[in-house]
Image (cartoon, rainbow, N blue to C red):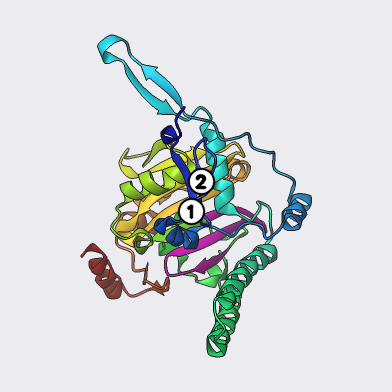
């Protein structure tokens, strides 16, 4: 089989992994520098770090090699159609999910996740310092590191009604339930917000919200086809969210099931929140807690969670990832995005 028949799987960390192919030696691709800032987490700094995680949270099974595409045909005669398909889509999806999750593991407590986030900052800080010998620039880098680490502690949220939090009208409104022992830690950059969800003190889900500026000039279908399908596989399952009583379709999404029993979902939330969203959830945990999709209703009317997905939210985010709670300012920002 010629190498040209292999479809790219993942563009992450400055390296392109090919679907069923050896990674190319030449990575001088201008698109890759942007992708580096969009990964979920940095990879392990060394073998000892991965080994320590294996010891604490269990060693994951070794995945089989990525497979070459195979031809699959349907129909007969003139109606016969053939296309190249992935013979092991769950393995392909697992490679992508593991790459995205990086140095995090399901079951981590809040403090451990914060520590891993601090490692990400330390790694980026080291890279910044290595690129300059200017004392003033190095001082600014040190201040940046202090601010980023301090921000992690500030962004720890306990989902309790008594806390009067505002997340019930945000893009992650459907991802949690108040007063059920759930928590979140979140971090932001100009192009990506990452939300780490905990149930009874254990990490079980991560949500990545990519701003529209992550891939300028690309709509959701292009991002799905040219980015997400390369990360997790070319043939996710198409799904839709339907209200059980009215049978009205609330939203469409796609889902990849992985060999690790993780579920990866992609949502288009650009109309209201200016974001393309990927969620990765531990399948075992989801079977215990139930799916968290934007379908909840109370007394025959849509909750704020569902209304927020469909439109009308007073919360949005500026280009720096800051939450804006002013409806007029949000409408203004959305108008700028549409232009």
Residue 27 is tagged as: 1
Q: Relative to residue 45, is residue 42 drawn left or right? A: left
Q: Which quadrant is the C terminus positioned in?
A: bottom left
The x, y position of residue 235, in whole percent, is 42, 35
In the image, residue 38 sits, relative to residue 187, either above or below, namely above
Could you say which quadrant of the image residue 252 lies in?
A: top left
Residue at (46%, 34%) from the top-left corner? Answer: 3
In magenta, the rendered stretch is 185-206
In the image, residue 218 sits, relative to residue 137, either above or below, namely above
Residue at (57%, 70%) from the top-left corner? Answer: 124
Residue furthest to the bottom in view is 136
> Circle 1 — which element?
loop
Circle 2 is placed at which residue position? 24
Q: Relative to residue 121, is residue 245 drawn left or right? A: left
The x, y position of residue 328, in whole percent, is 26, 74
The residues tagged by marks 2 and 1 sit, at their Cα atoms, a distance apart of 7 Å
Cβ–Cβ under 8 Å for marks 2 and 1: yes
Could you say which quadrant of the image residue 136 lies in?
A: bottom right
> Circle 2 — which element?
loop
Residue at (32%, 10%) from the top-left corner? Answer: 76
Q: Relative to residue 124, is residue 298 drawn left or right? A: left
The x, y position of residue 295, in whole percent, is 41, 47
In the image, residue 248 sits, relative to residue 118, either above or below, namely above
Q: Relative to residue 21, is residue 224 drawn left or right? A: left
């Amino acid at each position: 089989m010629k190498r040209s028949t292999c479809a790219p799987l993942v563009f992450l960390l400055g390296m392109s992994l090919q679907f069923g192919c050896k990674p190319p030696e030449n990575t001088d691709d201008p698109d890759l520098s942007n992708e580096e800032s969009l990964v979920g987490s940095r990879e392990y700094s060394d073998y000892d770090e991965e080994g320590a995680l294996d010891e604490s949270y269990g060693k994951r099974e070794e995945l089989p090699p990525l497979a070459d595409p195979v031809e699959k045909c349907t129909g007969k005669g003139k109606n016969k159609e053939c296309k190249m398909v992935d013979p092991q889509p769950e393995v392909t999806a697992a490679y992508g999910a593991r790459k995205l999750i990086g140095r995090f593991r399901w079951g981590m407590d809040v403090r451990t996740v914060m520590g891993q986030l601090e490692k990400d900052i330390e790694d980026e800080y080291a890279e910044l310092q290595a690129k300059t010998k200017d004392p003033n620039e190095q001082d600014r880098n040190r201040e940046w590191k202090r601010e980023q680490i301090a921000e992690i502690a500030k962004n720890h949220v306990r989902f309790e009604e008594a806390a009067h939090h505002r997340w019930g009208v945000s893009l992650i409104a459907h991802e949690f339930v108040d007063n059920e022992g759930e928590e979140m830690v979140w971090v932001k950059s100009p192009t990506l917000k990452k939300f780490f969800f905990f149930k009874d003190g254990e990490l079980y889900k991560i949500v990545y919200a990519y701003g529209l500026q992550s891939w300028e000039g690309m709509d959701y279908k292009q991002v799905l086809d040219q980015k997400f399908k390369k990360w997790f596989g070319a043939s996710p399952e198409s799904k839709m969210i339907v209200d059980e009583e009215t049978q009205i379709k609330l939203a469409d999404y796609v889902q990849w099931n992985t060999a690790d029993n993780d579920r990866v979902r992609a949502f288009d939330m650009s109309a209201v929140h200016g974001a393309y969203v990927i969620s990765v959830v531990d399948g075992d945990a989801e079977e215990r807690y139930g799916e968290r999709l934007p379908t909840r209703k109370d007394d025959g009317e849509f909750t704020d969670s569902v209304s927020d997905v469909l439109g009308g939210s007073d919360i949005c985010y500026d280009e720096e990832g800051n939450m804006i709670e002013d409806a007029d300012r949000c409408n203004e920002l959305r108008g700028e995005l549409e232009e």
